[in-house]
Amino acid sequence: MVHMDIFLQIWGGGCYLINKICFSLGEGRQGKDSSRLQTAGWLFYLSGVPAWVIILMEKHDWIAASIEAGGIPSMIFGLANTLRAGKEENRRFRRATTLITYVFIIIGLGSSFADYGGLVSFHQLLEVFVTIGFLMGSLLMAAQKKSGWLFFLIMNISMGILMLQQGKPFLAVQQLISLGFVLYGFLQSVGGLTPLHQGQSEKSGYGQTDQGA
């Protein structure tokens, strides 16, 4: 059972980490390079959902497990938008995805308040932040909105603390590493950083110039 728990943590945590890496690196690239990274990011995001749902169900955290599954439509929407780059998005799909997201946020928050009798604990507050951050972040990223990164920041910080409380250090570390890539992706999206691949190219170019001189 312990081995299975570790496997699920590596599976779910690893997929979500690779997702953030692909998303953040994709922000600093253009054309096909960006599209490939974004596509890979959405595929890894989807691949990690089953593991997270199982982990949460084992903790009898049915609300969080259902919320995790509730993010799937946004992930599919994001993948579809990436594959259809340059084409008009399916507005019906966008509306349906948005509606589903809001419904799951209401279900998650309503169930939490009903179970606890209101907002009464720090643990519950973290769950609320995870719910809003995960669902809104996924939806906004799918719609290619920069504000999605901010909701991912909220989600990663809150989930990292929750995983520490639940005795899952691997997932806590994964959330911390993901947080770094989310920060990088956000700064890239607002033009606050030089893309990693661009910086490497410039260094290579300087070297060639020096040699030529």
Image (cartoon, rainbow, N blue to C red):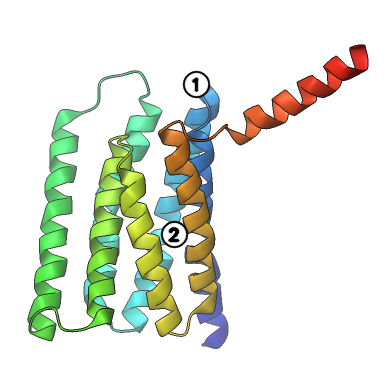
Relative placement, left or right, of 209 versus 81 is right
For marks 2 and 1, the one nearer the N-term is 1
Q: Nearer the viewer, residue 103 or 150?
A: 150
173 vs 213: above or below: below
Which of the labelled discs sits on residue 48, or is there none?
2
Query: The disc labelled 1 sits on which kind of residue?
Result: Gly
Q: Secondary structure at mark 2?
A: helix
Q: Quadrant of the C terminus?
A: top right
Percent x, y of residue 82:
38, 31
What residue is shown at x 22% (from left), y 69% (from top)?
128
Q: Nearer the viewer, mark 2 or mark 1?
A: 1
Query: The disc labelled 2 sits on which kind of residue?
Result: Gly
Relative placement, left or right, of 163 versus 211 is left
| Circle 2/circle 1 CB separation < 8 Å | no
**Residue that numbered label 1 is attached to:** 31
Q: Nearer the viewer, residue 16 or 1?
A: 16
Around disc 2, counting alpha carbons within 10 Å, would you say few (fewer than 14), some (14 to 19), or many (20 or more)?
many
Q: Nearer the viewer, residue 141 or 183?
A: 183
What residue is shown at x 25% (from left), y 63% (from top)?
131
Relative placement, left or right, of 57 versus 109 is right
Percent x, y of residue 197:
64, 31
Q: Secondary structure at mark 1?
A: helix
- Please identify the quarter of the rendering in which residue 187 is found: top left
- Please identify the quarter of the rendering in which residue 146 is found: top left
Distance between the alpha carbons at the discs numbered 2 and 1: 26 Å
16 vs 140: above or below: below
